[in-house]
Each structure stands twice: as C-alpha cells, then as structure tokens.
Amino acid sequence: MVKIRPTFLITFLFCTLIFTSCKNATEEPGIETSNNTETVGVLTDSEFISEFFTDSTATNKNLSLQRKEEVTAFYQKQDYKPVWVNAGLRESLFRNIENIDQEGLDPEDYHKTYLKESLSNLQNLNKEEQFKLEISLTDNFLQLAHDLYYGKLNPNELFEIWDLNKEDVDLTSLLEKAINEEDIEATLNSIKPDHPVYHGLKKSLAEYDKLRTQEKNITTIASGETIKPNENDPRIPSIVQRLEELGFPVEADSITNSYTPEIQKAIKDYQLRYGIEVDGVIGAGTISNLNKNSEERHHQVLANMERWRWFPRDFGDHYILVNIPNYRLTVVRDNDTISTHKVMVGTQARKTPVFSDKIQYVVYNPTWTIPPTIKKKDVIPGAARDISYLSKRNITIYNKDGEEVDPADINFDSGEGMSYTFRQKAGSSNPLGQVKIIYPNEYLIYLHDTPSKALFERNSRAESSGCVRVQGAIELSKYLLKNRSQYSSEKIDDIIASGKTTQIEVTQSVKVHHLYWTSWREDGEARFTADIYGTDEKIYNLLKD
C-alpha cells in the first residue's frame, strides 16, 4: 500500500478545511467555535498511530487508545485519509458521548473532557494535535459502539453459566456507515437495546439520579430479631418513619412499639413492590431492603442496564422469557403477551443458568432421570444412610447397558454409585409433576410441572435444583401443541390420565430465554426484586473501576 506523506495530507486538509468552513457558515454553531477554519487529520501509518497514544511527552498524555487494532485496520482501509472532516459529524459524536450517562455509561470513558477542549479550540491545535484528535474521534466511536452493543463487562466472568449468543457487529463497518450516511446518532441508536424493559430502566435511571441528589439523611433501622405481627419492638417507630419516606404511609392515629395491623399492611405493600416474600414478617431481608437508599437503587438500575446490553437484540417472533429473580415466565408472540406464569428457579447453591435454546418436545407423565449434582449430593448419600430411600421414592437404578440393577449390589459409600443412572418413575411423587417441556441443552435444564403447587404462593421461590418449575405447566404445554390438531386439550387430558409416559414433538418454532434482571418499571413506577444470585453490586463496582 502506498503511504500518504504528511506534505500531501496537509495540502489535502487545507483544501478540505476551506470547503468545511464555507459549509459550516450556514450551520448552527455547536461545540466548535464559529470562526473555526481548521479540520482534523490522521497520521500516515500504524506506527505513528500507536506512538501518539503512548508518548508520555505528548499533549494529553493520559489519553489512551482503546481499540488500537481496529483503529489501525480502519485507517489502512481508508488509505490513511481523514474521515472526521465534517464538523456536524464531530459535533454529533461529541453530543452522544456527552449524554451517554443517560444510557448508564460514563462519558469520561470516551474522553469527554479531552474532546470538548480539543473541539472547542480546534483552530489553535497544531498538526500533531489535529492528527491525534482525528484518531481519538475514531477510537471513541468504536469503543462507544462496542459498549452499547456488547456492554462494558464480560458476563462470563460474573456468572457461573452465561450462554447467550447474539450476532457479532463489525464496528469498523458501523463507523463507515455512520460517516457515509452522515448520521452518528441513528447508527448508535441502531445497536442499543430496544426492549420496553430497557427503555423503562432509562426512565428509572433519570428518576434515581435526581432522587439521590435530593435525598438527605434517611431513617436507618437497626438489625435485630424478626418482628412478627402483634409483637412489640423498639424499632417500630423507625420502621414506620422509613416506610413513610419510601411512600408507604401507615394509616394510624398513633404509633407505639407495637406491630399493629396497620403497619403490617404497609409492610406487605412494601414487600410486594420490592420482591420480598409477602408474609408481613419484618425479618433481616425486609430490614435490609428498607435500609437501601436512592444511591443504592441507582446502582441497581445501572447494573440492570448493563445486563440488557449483554442480552440478544432479537428474541425472535415467538418465545418464552423467564426472568429468574422475578420468578416469572412470559409467553410472547409477535410482540403480544400470550400468558404469564409464576415459576420456581434454582437456589443460590444450584443456580438456574442464563441461556437460550429451542423447544423440541413435551413429555407427559415423565420419568425423572436424576441429574449428576442431585445424584451426588442428595440421592447417593440418602441411599447410603438407608437403602429404602430409593424404593420410597420410586427410584430405579440402571447400568450403562440400560439394565436394572439391585441397589443391594451397590456400595453407596464409595464412588461406585455415580456410574449408574438413577430414574424416578412417573407418578404422584415425581418432582416433575405431569409434564416436562424439553429444549435439549448441556445444562440438563427444562421447564416442568410440580406436585407441590402450594409453593407458588410464596413470594420468594428460589427453591429448585436449577430447572424451572412452572405454575400452569399443563396449560403451557397445550399451548405449545395448539397447532397439532390431533392433540386437542381433551386428548392431552386422556394421555395424562393414562399414566403412560408419552413424548410429543413441538412443531412450532419457540425459543426459551432464561434471563436475569432485578429492576423494571410497572404502572409508571420503578420496581425492584431481590438479587437472588448477588450480582448487582458486583456489576456496578466493576463498571466504576
């Protein structure tokens, strides 16, 4: 490739700046001064690009090149010609960076102060500083586009299992598009999350950004024993005061140390809003939540906005969305909500993974092949203590050839048991209930029914071993088979009544997305739920590093 020499480039820039100056004379002044008669330029090879961002003697020595390889490749493709010759494009990029805090990102991560100083003083920059500015504009666009699309953090480093795939975006092609179409903002908007939850989080971010600056000293409640209805506790007046601060006033003529029904109603309303088990009991979890201030809620919103940048941009036309910490499953088709279901998810020790897959079939009257973790931690120790543990639970053991094995022939105190398959027969005691919905995956996770229906009445439902128990699982399965006329609702009821294990293919194209978010908006207000796997504050702290 023939390199463009500095003398040629300066002549090129001189011609360009005359055109730019005349064009800008009719445009509304922006950050660049109205008498600006300069433009920006780029160096002539990759070595100089690197040097300008590593030379400690250079102006703005703290300015670091963030995406060096892509910047170098981009200018090689451009034959090292400048691309930021349009003042309107420079202005647009700066304004997007200046306002990027509305997306939950930090403008200084994209060198806002440096760009503001350089662009407002463009006519006084020497050629070296102009070249640096050209490269910085390119570098900051690429970094900003990357963070808007992929997020700043790597979710695989924060979650034990995070397996969401989304299409890669070519950042340099995105920049070419923005330059050619002369529209920075539209190009950046095209890669941001475009989901109602994300848009709601932006509103919550603005709301809590304001609240945290206005909030003074909040009422802090001391830790202590759990407070139950009708009990007395000296913290009750503080609890009532904090409830009122949060918009949950107690309708009572006077407040004593007694936990009255009026206070209990306010507590239950608060627990419902903030995803705490609605039991009216003031335990450690409720007090911890009451003590959270607006700054902490602001952190939580920022963490959730980052998560949404990790999610796929397109969930498909027909899908099931499981929000793990909110214990909710939603069926969506053509952007319409078909149904919602309560669910139970994995415990802290046996987390439900974040991933996506396609539904393939349903099984009525399912048997349960016990997964390795449960086999190791629960079933084998149970059998070692009492051999009748297996028969009481209708569990049969098979060898690798599929032959049934007598439990009495196995030494459960050794590691021998792990080499066998443990399967629980269909029936009333089977934890999968009457149906399971399968989307084959390496994590052995699926949706299923449960015989323990009362558990869905609890507000906190992280009680499974990783799979997702669904309230109304039979109705959900019938919906998935709705396009298959031979499997009417009555036919499916007959299959279930027979007790025979029956597998039926799902021919509709339906994906299941297991996602995780702890804040959203509902009825025009911010909602929060417990961060059951403890990642919100970790994400926030890493964002601010």
Image: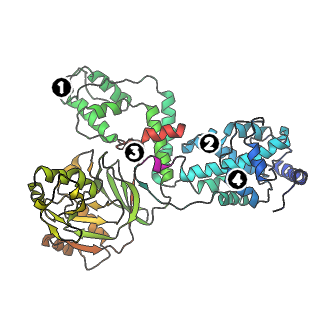
Disc 4, SS: helix
- Give me the residue at 22% from left, 72% from top: 401
Q: Earlier along the polypeptide chain: callout 2 or callout 1?
A: 2
Task: Note whether 229 is above or below 107 in the view shown.
Answer: above
Kind of residue at disc 3: Thr
Q: Earlier along the polypeptide chain: callout 1 or callout 4?
A: 4
Q: Earlier along the polypeptide chain: callout 4 or callout 3?
A: 4
Q: Which residues are magenta?
A: 152-159
Residue under circle 4?
A: 71
Residue under circle 2?
A: 99
Q: Name the disc covering residue 231, or none.
A: 1
Disc 3, SS: loop
Q: Quadrant of the C terminus?
A: top right
Q: CB atoms at circles 2 and 3 under 8 Å apart? A: no
- Give me the residue at 31% from left, 36% from top: 270
Q: Earlier along the polypeptide chain: callout 1 or callout 3?
A: 1
